[in-house]
Amino acid sequence: ILQVFEAEAALVCEGMVCADEDLWLDGKPGDDMIDDYIADLDEVEKVGVDTVILHLTSKQNPPAPNELGVNRLMRLFSAAKERGISVALENNKVPGYFEYVFRMTGDSAKVCLDVGHWHAHFKDRFDRKLLDGRIVAVHLHDNFGEDDEHLLPFDGNVPWEFYAENISACGYGGDITLESRYYGKYTVESLDEFYRTAFSKACKLREIFDKY
């Protein structure tokens, strides 16, 4: 899936693939999944995307991280590196996967830090030592610290100054990507109006991030 959005007359493309629990399970489905992702890298390269984002899990009670899954990831990392593409692992619902994968892969693994997920599921327990030098993308959306609501920034209680400071301290100064959803209370306005509101909030966030 390619996420494409317009910002200041420039198109920014970010590739995303969402792994499921087969990554960590023995059997042909897990092998086929990684083979498919590696094949997709050729298409990603053709359109000039230099970062793809991978969810390590998708469910609330996934299998434990293991060597089999890491070996599959290393195949993907190697194929991506040959094409000049970074694979960024995104934090999802369950902690512990980054720690395991980083320990097994050294500096190979990079991170897409999803602030909304970190706030709701990891309760803002930010580990600079764990993430230092690894962040290559960020996804920003808001919630009230309980559910993954994908609200617009400043419509929940994410501590944005805290995240801006810590993400910057880890060496990241690149693009910021809003991952808010047009649903519920937002549908009282048109989609165009929602985009305008989102862009205004993104500019406010950019100002906060630029302070650090």
Image: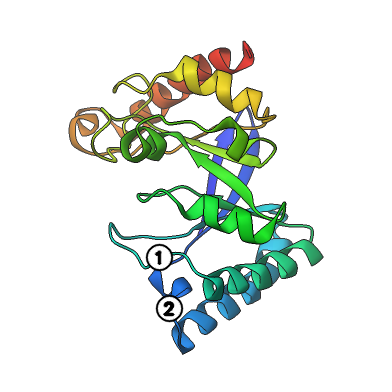
Q: Residue at x 42, y 75 (%)?
A: 22
Q: Residue at x 33, y 40 (%)?
A: 121
Coordinates of residue 7 in the picture (x, y in percent): 59, 31
Using the image, tell me which numbered label, if any, was put on residue 25.
Answer: 2
**Residue nearer the viewer, 91 or 2:** 91
Coordinates of residue 153 in the picture (x, y in percent): 38, 24
Q: Residue at x 74, y 68 (%)?
A: 78
User: Is residue 74 shown above or below 88?
Assistant: below
Q: How many marks?
A: 2
> Residue 116, located in which quarter of the rendered image?
top left
Q: Secondary structure at mark 1?
A: loop
The residue indicated by pointer 1 is: 64
Q: Residue at x 62, y 55 (%)?
A: 103
**Residue nearer the viewer, 59 or 48:** 59
Image quadrant in which the C terminus is located: top right
- Please say if the residues under marks 2 and 1 sit with CB atoms less than 8 Å apart: no
Using the image, tell me which numbered label, if any, was put on residue 184.
Answer: none
Chain-order first, disc 2 or disc 1: 2
Residue type beneath disc 1: Ala
Q: Secondary structure at mark 2?
A: loop
> Residue 145, located in which quarter of the rendered image?
top left
Coordinates of residue 155 in the picture (x, y in percent): 29, 21
Q: Dot 2: within a 10 Å radius of its alpha carbon, few (fewer than 14), some, or many (20 or more) residues?
A: some
Relative side of 59 to 175, left or right: left
User: Is residue 111 shown above or below 119?
Assistant: below
User: Is residue 61 shown above or below 26?
Assistant: above
Q: Dot 1: within a 10 Å radius of its alpha carbon, few (fewer than 14), some, or many (20 or more) residues?
A: some
Coordinates of residue 124 in the picture (x, y in percent): 40, 29
User: Is residue 211 shown above or below 144?
Assistant: above
Residue type beneath disc 2: Leu
Q: Nearer the viewer, mark 2 or mark 1?
A: 1
Calculate the distance from the C-alpha at mark 2 to the C-alpha at mark 1: 9 Å
